[in-house]
Amino acid sequence: MPPPVTPALETDKIELRNVSGTRRQGASSLCLEIISADHTGEAEIEVKGQITGVSDNLLSFEAFVNELAVPKLKLQTQNDSWTLRTTYKPFEPPSPPCGGVGEVVKNALVVCLVKATSGVKGKMILIKQQATIET
């Protein structure tokens, strides 16, 4: 007997059907490459990359650091190359009473997204918050 919060199913089998997608031509050629990702200051990062395979108009390039959108002024694009240099608010969770925090938590999370009429590509980058800055 199923729990009262879920409706009963007619069967426990799922019929798989061939669903044809409407994939646009050229979507697989769009590529978002990360050349470098560095911690450049106390709470500052710099990410450099390249966009290749854009056979049509590039509609937008967006970036997010720790879930916050990076202002357009902090994103520089020139031909196929791009640079993101911005400050961010470091996140350090309180230590739990048992165990520790995972490695992912000690990083700045950067998400880059490029949109063109031929497709959409994105990349996620983790940059250590406590990295040693070389001068």
Image (cartoon, grey):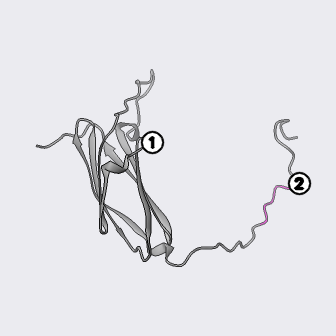
* Residue 97 is covered by the magenta coloring: no
Toward the top, the furthest residue is 97
Q: Position of residue 96 (x, y in %)?
A: 44, 24
Count of marks placed on residues: 2
In the displayed structure, 30 sits above or below 67; it is: below
Disc 2 or 1, which lies upstream in sequence? 2
Q: Which residues are magenta?
A: 11-15
- Residue corresponding to mark 1: 67
Q: Amino acid at mark 1?
A: Glu
In the displayed structure, 118 sits above or below 1; it is: below
In the displayed structure, 26 sits above or below 100; it is: below
> Which image quarter holds the N terminus?
top right
Toward the left, the furthest residue is 135
The alpha-carbon separation of the residues under discs 2 and 1 comes to 41 Å
Q: Position of residue 71 (x, y in %)?
A: 37, 46
Q: Amino acid at mark 2?
A: Glu
Q: Position of residue 43 (x, y in %)?
A: 27, 36
What's the mark number on residue 10? 2
- Count neighbours of disc 1 (C-alpha within 10 A) and say few if under 14, some if 14 to 19, many if 20 or more: few
> Which image quarter holds the C terminus?
top left
**Residue 81 vs residue 2, the one in the foreground:** 81
